[in-house]
Image: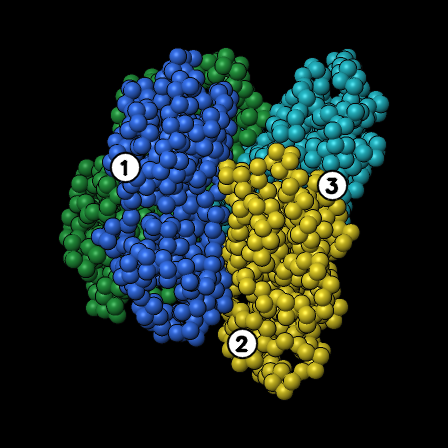
Chain colours: A yellow, B blue, C green, D cyan
Amino acid sequence: MKRIGILTSGGDCQGLNAAIRGVAKGLYVEFGKDVEIYGINDGYRGLIEGSYQQMKPDDFSGILTLGGTILGTSRQPFKLMRVMDDNSVDKVQNMKENYKKMKLDCLVVLGGNGTHKTANLLSEEGLNVVTLPKTIDNDVWGTEMTFGFSSAMEIATNVLDCIHTTATSHGRVFIVEIMGHKAGWLTLHSGIAGGADVILIPEIPYSIDSIVKTLEQRNKNGKRFSILAVAEGVLSQEEASMGKKEFKAARAKMPYPSISYRLSKEISERTGQEIRVTVPGHFQRGGSPCPYDRLLATRFGAAAAKLIADKKYGFMAALQNNVIVPVPLNEVAGKLKGVPADSDIIKTARDIGISFGD
Amino acid sequence: MKRIGILTSGGDCQGLNAAIRGVAKGLYVEFGKDVEIYGINDGYRGLIEGSYQQMKPDDFSGILTLGGTILGTSRQPFKLMRVMDDNSVDKVQNMKENYKKMKLDCLVVLGGNGTHKTANLLSEEGLNVVTLPKTIDNDVWGTEMTFGFSSAMEIATNVLDCIHTTATSHGRVFIVEIMGHKAGWLTLHSGIAGGADVILIPEIPYSIDSIVKTLEQRNKNGKRFSILAVAEGVLSQEEASMGKKEFKAARAKMPYPSISYRLSKEISERTGQEIRVTVPGHFQRGGSPCPYDRLLATRFGAAAAKLIADKKYGFMAALQNNVIVPVPLNEVAGKLKGVPADSDIIKTARDIGISFGD
Amino acid sequence: MKRIGILTSGGDCQGLNAAIRGVAKGLYVEFGKDVEIYGINDGYRGLIEGSYQQMKPDDFSGILTLGGTILGTSRQPFKLMRVMDDNSVDKVQNMKENYKKMKLDCLVVLGGNGTHKTANLLSEEGLNVVTLPKTIDNDVWGTEMTFGFSSAMEIATNVLDCIHTTATSHGRVFIVEIMGHKAGWLTLHSGIAGGADVILIPEIPYSIDSIVKTLEQRNKNGKRFSILAVAEGVLSQEEASMGKKEFKAARAKMPYPSISYRLSKEISERTGQEIRVTVPGHFQRGGSPCPYDRLLATRFGAAAAKLIADKKYGFMAALQNNVIVPVPLNEVAGKLKGVPADSDIIKTARDIGISFGD
Amino acid sequence: MKRIGILTSGGDCQGLNAAIRGVAKGLYVEFGKDVEIYGINDGYRGLIEGSYQQMKPDDFSGILTLGGTILGTSRQPFKLMRVMDDNSVDKVQNMKENYKKMKLDCLVVLGGNGTHKTANLLSEEGLNVVTLPKTIDNDVWGTEMTFGFSSAMEIATNVLDCIHTTATSHGRVFIVEIMGHKAGWLTLHSGIAGGADVILIPEIPYSIDSIVKTLEQRNKNGKRFSILAVAEGVLSQEEASMGKKEFKAARAKMPYPSISYRLSKEISERTGQEIRVTVPGHFQRGGSPCPYDRLLATRFGAAAAKLIADKKYGFMAALQNNVIVPVPLNEVAGKLKGVPADSDIIKTARDIGISFGD
């Protein structure tokens, strides 16, 4: 009898349940009645506290299109420092003990960057771990694509579409703030798909001068409106040249709920134009996964089941050149996949006249 | 030859183009080649400044599903005071002169409450005016329904749906701020359709005590999460008892971009729970009209054409008991249709356990 | 302790689960722990065969947006003849016995026209029955609106939208066949909302001559394409003048899977134009209910709970002038609500140049 | 002054206008005012007949989300035989002459497989040609992805979703027929994303025995329903072993409008179960492109403009390993990209228990 534990960790996103279903269906096809699947509640917290239950095949039916995660999730249990403190050590110890108590053959972990750091740690501590890359940010190293990203991109693009009609009708400038603290994938893709005129991403620090110039040029060309797609994690060129401490201090003083409001104020002061800000927020992470994400999550899930069948532990199922491949966890952990400067898509955007504010 | 002017005024919403198309198709069927339609640009501003152009039948093709307004729009040209100032008088004079210069037989106006005040004024000044009620707020007096409302309700509900999956997965409390400064229709309808646990609307001032009690009760019943649908124009019971000046002064000091952030802080301080706020904003007014709004806008448009054919001027096309009827402009102007205290739908909501925070 | 049974009968549609949830939430608010709800499986069949189970409050969580019915459904158990045969009598007897065995205080029935005949019969046989009107056809007597209709209208309109782009690009004539055997509501509403040029409904028998004339007129006016929205239950003026037997015999010989193919052939022979047929079929009845249907179904459900609390049995919850009211079952049973000849909406359609093929 | 012609050919699909816009924006950024763009009407037909017009920059505004093609399209002008007949030769001659008359520097062609044969022919005849791969079938050789495919996949999956709720509620077997005469990409992707139990594609001939066995096994496992996603171009194993003539003759006798009806009859006779068929048809090709397709089409369009700037003629813009690359037209023409037998995605599907009827 194989005993497999499964948990979802970090911010929820679309496709988690589709991936869970993929893992389960794959395991049932592979092992038939010789497998027991245990759902661990609320991410790593459930593993630390020993909160879990055995799942029945029926639990995985009808969840392909369901948003969120049937297992619950929670934030990472510890910020992994170079040197872990006692509290962290205890938590790791708890997880190892519960893994043993549950007599698991493998732990399947669905999560993003933080989750993968912890998953790699558990793997290094000797647990059998297989992971799936989920996040709307698409910033997990080693895979071209994470599930959740495409669904979030559809929502963000849809917001841009809706703002477009208002911007056109009123002749206004709009800022749409799109999720993404460190990586600009979501803003870049939805910005182009949604017809944004200016796209600001964390990988390309912006200059207010450049943005203002673009807006003025559009006015000159008779364009009544402009739309800026702005990642929540953007920073100015000045900020980019600051040290980490200095930057944090500067931001701590920023009297705005988010960067878009600062941008709005700065641009409005310079151009005299009224600027409207829209912050769709968590909305981008919820709801039913789009068909592409369901397919991708299912592929990742089935691949995880295969890895378990082959006793290939310590890997993340990843997409590379459109094929699912295993990538060692220690290659994934601690890295971030940002938009590269020579990205084909950034070039495309520039080629059709989109400004990156640089 | 009939000469008809048409303008869209105030905030844009879904269905404006469908309504414009309905007016045009109705006029062409009624008058054939004996009608000329003039599109007036950017709302009343175009009438004041004499900015307009003759439309061709093709201009009204393919716009049934198009968001925004092909004519452009702008804010009301003057806040209608009990006593108009010289500037206002001049603007009214300009509009009358341009109406005459254009040799119009009738002016068709699409707009909400502010727009109708002005439309009534022009009608009282002797212009032939026919209007259509548009607004996502559904707060125009004399009609059961305005176009734009259903589309906005679908968007707001969709936001609630998406937030639901995140709230469930993380076990959090979420506030979703929905448009509506003075009327709670949009929040009420989408709140029920989106499964909100607490609905706050301007018509029912809230008490933090009551809200906190509801949330605590849900916790006791084992509910991991709660969702509050909050109209942007809500006020507390204390605020409701203030005079207008006192209220304005109090609000001016409020250090939050909108009421939801204040609510979030107050509830979080009382319950110790983390609260997340989502403000979809202008997103709710944009994009393609939903099928119901296209049908309703088309019906209003066709009715306006009929009124013109019958030379029945000074009316708004309205929906009453599911039939389109004309309502005199002077009955509409200056009134607001809020959610009545004995509303059938509020009763429904209470009957299934939804709290209104009162 | 109140004991309430609930069943869904006839073809499934959007909003059934929302209505079930509304009933349950209403009962729990009304009676607290003093109510037990029994789900009866697969429509009346479950009542005949005694197949049911007690529901827990959790069973009604998270189903507001879920398509289909968690209780299952089946066709009507017997075609209600003027004189029932022995088999029918036995089935009625079984239902009465199981109702008693289950010690029900009331049976809540969700269904369309056929379902209401049986519900009324059971009521006349002495059972306590309360019903809710569901059907995408919107043809239940006594209520302005049934739930399911708006969702199906959105789907049918969306199909028309998609066909529109192909029709425009290729300059073709398209027939879209929309559900509705006896009533044309769905075709009428989605036809207008989807910009159809010709709308054919069962209530208005068509003449091929008239249709061909309309298409030729459009060609003359330079329109490259035409779209016909056709209810599956339409008949020609010749067929309308036939006796029932003669009509059935004629249709039995029709060598087409559905009426649209016959229309396609006839029109194509007359005009020389190529005609494409699209039959979305059951697709129109499935998927998540639209926000309007969720609200309406919830209102009906809450009203049913109120009727039970008031011991008002033998009623259907209905919408009249936008308020929920009880309508006696014996007024509903056996009647069909078709589109009236003097319908405000048909007039609108004609006023903007839509042809009904008559 | 650069003079660029652009045409769209073959069946329309989502993203054509987004691609046209991408080409235009790319050209305007590259050449500024030194470029004139000519829209050729209704595909190659416009080039044969000399029907075209000069486009203005404004013509390309607001079309990013618009379905269909603003240029119109038509079927291929000639079936390219090994030996062309006189009529074909004349048409080619006409195209060359009009190309010269229009003084074009390059012709941009958007289309699928048939279109590319002709494009290659024109290139071999000495015209400067650049192409973009469009089709919902995703079967163009040399590119991982064509635009239109993702949008059609979303629609087909949505149909499967809707059918799912009805199938579950009624306990029925449903066949959903999905577009794809020669390639199974659309059925394969949407089948997995939509949770189909059996997927039939042209690349894997089916056996009724195998399908029946799968359905019976599902019944044994207590599954009340089954959904078959069937490509319109599937054939049985017997048919696959026939010669081309024999196959055509056999199909010509088939008394069904499409293969799904035959399957339905055969399965129903063998299992005694009622089978429902849904054929969404052209609906799958229409409507607004999904965000992914808008991005992809924009990238292809921008790449085409770059090729023109670099005077690299005779190429198709293609996606390979997620980067846009040029592929010589003569490598593309006349080939079909079917789903390979060792496809990673087919393996995934089998790994989670989906049957391919083989």
In which quadrant of the rendered view does residue B22 lie? top left
Query: At which x and y percent is residue B79?
Result: 37, 41
* Residue density around tag 3, few if under 14, some if 14–19, many if 20 or more, within 10 Å: many
Percent x, y of residue B215: 36, 69
For this rendering, which residue is in front, D15 or D262? D15
**Marks 3 and 2, the one that precedes in the sequence:** 2
What's the residue type where badge 3 is placed? Asp
Q: Which residue has dot 3 on it?
A: A351
User: Which residue lies at the image location 52% right of the left edge and 73% below the top edge?
Assistant: A41
The secondary structure type at the circle numbered 2 is helix
Kindly identify which residue carries mark 2: A46
Circles 1, 3 touching at the beta carbon (< 8 Å): no
Label 1 and label 3 in one chain: no
Residue nearer the viewer, A311 or C222: C222
Q: Are marks 1 and 2 on the same chain?
A: no
* Type of the residue with mark 1: Val
In the rendered structure, the answer to whether residue B141 lies left or right of residue D12 reads left
Image quarter (top left, top right, bottom left or bottom right) of the N terminus of chain B: top left
The answer for which chain carries disc 1 is B
Marks 3 & 2, CB-CB < 8 Å contact: no
Q: CA separation, marks 1 and 2?
A: 59 Å
Q: Secondary structure at mark 3?
A: helix
Q: Please tell me the numbered disc located at residue B332.
A: 1
Identify the residue at horizontal 40%, vertical 55% (top origin). B232
- Residue at image coords 50%, 39%: A170
Q: Chain of mark 3?
A: A
